[in-house]
Amino acid sequence: MLVSDSSGSFFAWEEELHGLKHHIGRVFARCKVRESAGLFLDGVLSGIERKTGWLMAEQAGLSKPYRIQSLLGRGRWDADALRDVLHDTVVKAIGDPAGVLVVDATGFLKQDKHSVGVSHKHSGTADRIEKAKLAFFCLMPAGLATA
């Protein structure tokens, strides 16, 4: 399942993703590296089960994984600058520099065979491997500040 399948309008999602790629693109000076970063982001957000260089390259329509692998291994870009751009983006979305964004994975135990996404996995709810679905929630708790 793609992120866009569960996040509302596909076109709104696609537009937001395009905007994010444009926003972080300034970190990547070379056009090819910037394009590879966009393809990498598409691969990470895609529905492919394993996020390897080969599979992400295949997802992007590339015949070989070298562009994806080069981005992470040999590409010249400033990781600290990318971190700062993303930090500023998150602070702007939260609306408070002292805000906190919490990502929580919650397991829902399931016994039936017909629910999508059910498989044997570790569930914190059961504190063991069990048939479950996982859901991820982003929370912005009020009154918390970063350390």
Image: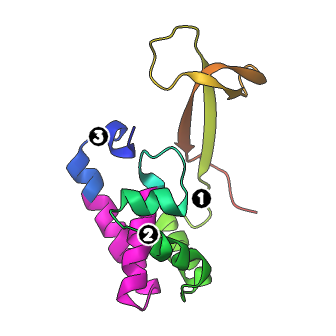
Measured from the top left, where is residue 95 in percent x and y?
A: 48, 61
Residue at 56%, 44% (x, y): give it.
139
Disc 3 to disc 1, how far (Cα)? Answer: 26 Å
Magenta-tinted stretch: 15-43
Q: Which residue is the site of mark 3?
A: 8
Residue at 40%, 91% (x, y): give it.
30
Label 2 or label 1, whichever lies nearer to me, is: 2
Q: Is residue 14 left or right of residue 39?
A: left
Which image quadrant is residue 87 in?
bottom right
Q: Earlier in the sequence, mark 3 or mark 1?
A: 3
Given residues 88 and 135, the one toward you in this image is 135
Q: Earlier in the sequence, mark 3 or mark 2?
A: 3
Amino acid on which the number 1 mark rests in the picture? Gly
Q: Quadrant of the C terminus?
A: bottom right
Residue at the outermost left position: 11
Q: Earlier in the sequence, mark 2 or mark 1?
A: 2
Q: Which residue is the site of mark 1?
A: 99
Amino acid on which the number 3 mark rests in the picture? Gly
